[in-house]
Image (cartoon, rainbow, N blue to C red):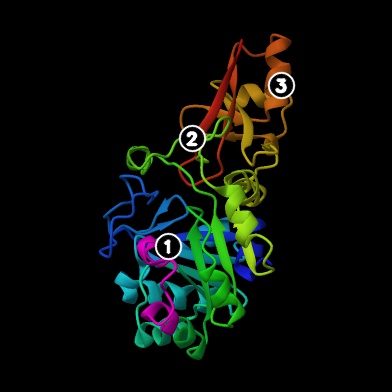
Amino acid sequence: MISKGCEQCAKGGKMVLFVYGYCDQRDCFYCPLGENRKNVTQVYANERAVESDEDVLTEAKRMDALGTSITGGEPQEALDKTCHYLSLLKDEFGEDHHTHLYTGITGGRENMRRLSEAGLDEIRFHPPLEQWGDLHGTEWEEILYIAREEGLTPAFEIPGIRAEPEFLEFLDEGAADFCNINEFEMSDGNFRRMQEEGFELREGHMSAVESPKEEILDVMGSHERVYFCTSVFKDAAQHRRRLKRMARNLRRPFDEVTDDGTLVYGKTWVSPEELDALGVPEEFYTVKSEHVEVAWWLLEEMIEEGDLPEGEIVEQYPTVDGTVVERTPLA
């Protein structure tokens, strides 16, 4: 089974709203946050640093977001801010804009009530690793029922460290709706700590680590409400599809959208008058302060025929920072 939040994520339709970088409960060795996100109060909508409410709405519109996933740090430790953005998104995009939140603390009834009233749909709990297997009879069992009573869909979202049958018991008892297991990964933020714990990258993978994936699937994978999210799927499907949504919304008439969700165009340093003289239609180029961006195939043809001296083909991400992936000189 895949939840509504995951369905939207798989389509590349979930905006990621990072609301708070602090997490006072514990320092998990597998926490993937990099130095630019750890222990900061700066809010980010996808890659965009948020300075105003309009920044959040702009980013959601930029990717034609179907919903939003709220993360941190610990979003419940900045509850006023978290509820503000939930209300903002629901007011702007309506009830169909699906929201889910990741949390590593229980929070209590008042938090569940406030989150629900602000517009949260799903809440995904990540209990401390050291308590796995002994969650029954604790606040972690209680909060699942409280969350549901307050109108939220309660679930677990855990890293694929080991198989743990107790999570299946919560599903069968009706306490949790689903359990997502994320393939264990290394990142710039946790690489050193992961190695200190004895984990290494899986051969042939950029982020997935050597972990008991097969054992986890044997024990938990056959349950209809357990979903194992692989690192390959996150990169190849979720991230790439989000980029494609952005690229399709942002592309100019002359931009090419690649299968990876990047934009490709030409760049040259001639005057727009020269392009007009060569018969390039106005919709196929844009004048910048120090250069001109133009359809790459036209630029390539003009340089090959000697009509222009030089240029380059640029491939870049459609994100707000416009990171350039590759430059190919033409001369």
CA gap between label 2 and label 3 equals 53 Å
CA gap between label 3 and label 1 equals 51 Å
Along the line of sight, the residue nearer the viewer: 239 or 62: 239
Residue at the spot of label 2: 201
Q: Amino acid at mark 3?
A: Leu
Q: Where's residue 226, x and y in %? A: 62, 65
Residue at the spot of label 1: 71
> Above or below — where is 27 with respect to 199?
below
Q: Which residues are magenta?
A: 126-142
> Above or below — where is 108 with respect to 35?
below
Mark 1, other Cα within 10 Å: few <14 / some 14–19 / many ≥20: many
Magenta-colored stretch includes residue 178: no
Can you say which quadrant of the picture contains the C terminus?
top right
Return the disc, 1 or 2, that comes first in the chain's sequence: 1
Can you name the residue that lies furthest to the bottom here? 149
- Residue drawn at 48 percent across, 61 percent down: 158
Magenta-colored stretch includes residue 133: yes
Left or right of residue 24: residue 234: right
Residue at the spot of label 3: 278
Along the line of sight, the residue nearer the viewer: 291 or 155: 155
Q: Which circle, 2 or 3, is nearer the viewer? A: 2
Q: Amino acid at mark 1?
A: Thr
Q: Which circle, 1 or 2, is nearer the viewer? A: 2
- Residue drawn at 50 percent across, 48 percent down: 184
Residue 191's disc is: none
